[in-house]
Amino acid sequence: MSSMFDSYEREYCDLSTGISRKTQTLSSLSAAEKDPKLQEIQADVAEAKALITRMDLEARSLPVAAKTPLLAKLREYKEDLNKLKRDMTKAAATGVNDEARDELLSRAELGSSLPGFRLFKLLDVSDGPSSSSTSAGQRERLLQTHEQLNMTGDRIRQGKQTLLETEELGVSILQDLHKQRETISHAREHLHDADDSIGRARKVLTSMSRRAMTNKLILALIIMLLLASIGIIIYFKVIKN
């Protein structure tokens, strides 16, 4: 198994646990506290998705025997990440709906003292200065709440867009790094092949050098034998004469 895959896997498991804990506390926060916490969770989710992409690239670079179990793990991690996203969305929506429901319940309690009138009549019909003041205050709070919800939604959309752009950039960088890694691996293989070729050539040259030295020794021995033979022939001719 790849040590790089193991490292990414440990990081993802730690990050997944942290996302789950933060999501559990999200629904109990107020609107002011929820927005930064939600952005933090979204950033963690984007990082977790990037880790899954890295694990995918790392697994696909391995042989088939090692790749198959890792791809099965990746499918489980992708399902886990989708569940974390659903839990985050549910927790965020639950908090917003609770605040809106509380506001509506406060209006319903105020309208219960006026039988025969619907809830929206409280905003339009006054029963004296006190009722008019209360109705105006309720309208102002509702408008403020609606404005805060709209601003929160805009920030969430902007954060989501930023995360998507960052994710696309990260995936592109990871793909480039993977291609560079393959190029380096191919270059390393070529270097090994070249080194083997140089080693074989060195052996051939050493063998040729040894053969040349042997041929020189044999040639020198033959010349010495020839000279000795000529000397013997000349010697016998001189003695006979």
Image (tube, helix red, strand yellow):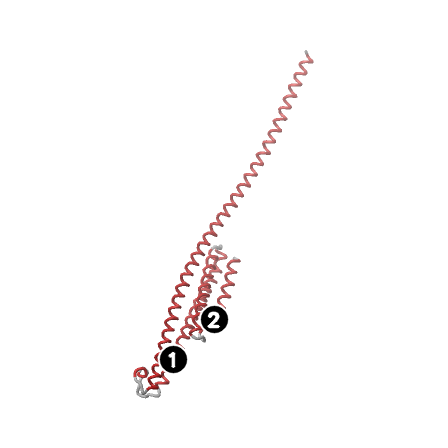
Q: Residue at x 68, y 13 (%)?
A: 238
Dot 1: few (<14), some (14–19), or many (≥20) neighbours within 10 Å? some
Q: Quadrant of residue 134?
A: bottom left
Residue to which mark 2 is pinned: 22
**Is residue 220 placed above or below 189 in the rendered structure?**
above
> Residue 172, percent across and down?
42, 56
**Is residue 227 placed above or below 75 in the rendered structure?**
above
Give the quarter of the figure containing the C terminus.
Answer: top right
Which of label 1 and label 2 is nearer to you? 1
**Gap between marks 1 and 2, in whole Å?**
26 Å
Amino acid type shown at disc 1: Glu
**Is residue 72 placed above or below 223 in the rendered structure?**
below
Q: Residue at x 32, y 82 (%)?
A: 123
Amino acid type shown at disc 2: Lys
> Residue 3, percent across and down?
53, 58
Left or right: residue 55 compared with residue 234: left
Q: Earlier in the sequence, mark 1 or mark 2?
A: 2
Residue to which mark 1 is pinned: 103
Secondary structure beneath dot 2 equals helix
Can the viewer see residue 53 in this picture? yes
Can the viewer see residue 1 in this picture? no
**Is residue 71 placed above or below 182 in the rendered structure?**
below
Q: Residue at x 44, y 54 (%)?
A: 176
Secondary structure beneath dot 1 equals helix
> Residue 82, percent across and down?
43, 67
Residue closest to the eye, 173 or 223: 173
| Circles 1 and 2 in contact, beta carbons < 8 Å | no
Residue found farthest to the top: 241
> Residue 208, percent across and down?
57, 34
Residue closest to the eye, 112 or 229: 112
Residue closest to the eye, 119 or 85: 119
Which of the labelled discs sits on residue 183, or is there none? none
